[in-house]
Image (tube, rainbow, N blue to C red):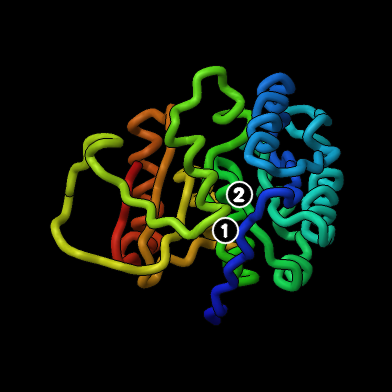
Amino acid sequence: MSLLNIAPQRLMKGDTVGVIAPASPPVPEKLDRAVRFLKDLGLEVKMGRSASERHGYLAGSDEERLLDLHDMFEDRSVKAVICACGGYGTARIAEKIDYRLIKSRPKIFWGYSDITFLHTAIRQNTGLITFHGPMLSSDIGKEDVHPLTRHSFQQLFQKMTLTYTEELSPLETLVNGAAEGELVGGNLALLVTTLGTPYEIDTKGKLLFIEDVDEDPYRIDRMLNQLKMAGKLSDAAGILLC
């Protein structure tokens, strides 16, 4: 059953954003640097408890990370929920998320990498349009940040047309043609883990975006083949590889 798209409200200077770590723990000094960046944008920052917790390779227990997510969506003063970093573990909380809460309190949800599982689960259970954007600790928290990475946060304040050109990196067309559709996808490894679950990625008539780094060619081949056998590539209107 298709859902109506829900677009979150844009941010304004003075708004409060919530920072959570639904996957692995962020690097504290990098997260501190990223929080200063958010404040320089004119935003107030509310830190989730999980952002400073550690439970093995996770930022707190499943219950703690889930509670953080719920708290940020429930708090009416929080206008956006921004993930500190990726890593591992978001899929562990997907089946316990209160999607009715998220649908009733739609707001910006931002992140990538392991957060891909939550993008897919939230989008397909609520219709909320989410943002595949740079991480705080992993990207903004670096000492040397690409200007485009910083500029990407401006789309949260104002309507922007994002155009990917050769000025950013070389582009190669593998199959000629034209396509349009809703953009879905994210990290390849995480998209594959949705298959066979209630959160299986829906690509029918959509533009499937795929990204991943530091994966051996044989693993990329294996994961793409699994998506192909599951019909996800043939269902898509177009495919973008990054």
Q: Is residue 83 above or below residue 2?
A: above
Q: Any mark on residue 65, and which? A: none
Q: Seen from this angle, which residue lies furthest left?
A: 176
Q: Any mark on residue 130, and which? A: 1
Q: Nearer the viewer, residue 218 or 204?
A: 204
Give yes or no for contact between labels 1 and 2 (Cβ–Cβ under 8 Å). Answer: yes
Q: What residue do we see at 22% from left, 39% from top?
A: 166
Query: Does residue 181 appear in this view?
Result: yes
Q: Is residue 24 left or right of residue 116?
A: right
Mark 2 is surrounded, within 10 Å at the Cα level, by few (under 14), some (14 to 19) or many (20 or more) other residues, namely many
Q: What residue do we see at 72% from left, 25% from top?
A: 32
Q: Position of residue 183 (x, y in %)?
A: 42, 61
Q: Quadrant of the N terminus?
A: bottom right
Q: Quadrant of residue 180?
A: bottom left
Query: Which of the marked residues, 1 or 2, is nearer the chain's N terminus?
Result: 2
Q: Quadrant of the C terminus?
A: top left
Q: Quadrant of residue 23?
A: top right
Q: Is residue 229 left or right of residue 166?
A: right
Query: Does residue 197 appear in this view?
Result: no
Q: Disc 1 to disc 2, how far (Cα)?
A: 6 Å
Q: Is residue 113 left or right of residue 53?
A: left
Q: What residue do we see at 55% from left, 74% from top?
A: 5
Q: Secondary structure beneath disc 1?
A: loop
Residue type, mark 2 in image: Trp
Q: Any mark on residue 110, and which? A: 2
Q: Position of residue 75 (x, y in %)?
A: 84, 58
Q: What residue do we see at 36% from left, 62% from top?
A: 207
Q: Quadrant of residue 60?
A: top right
Q: Is residue 76 left or right of residue 109?
A: right
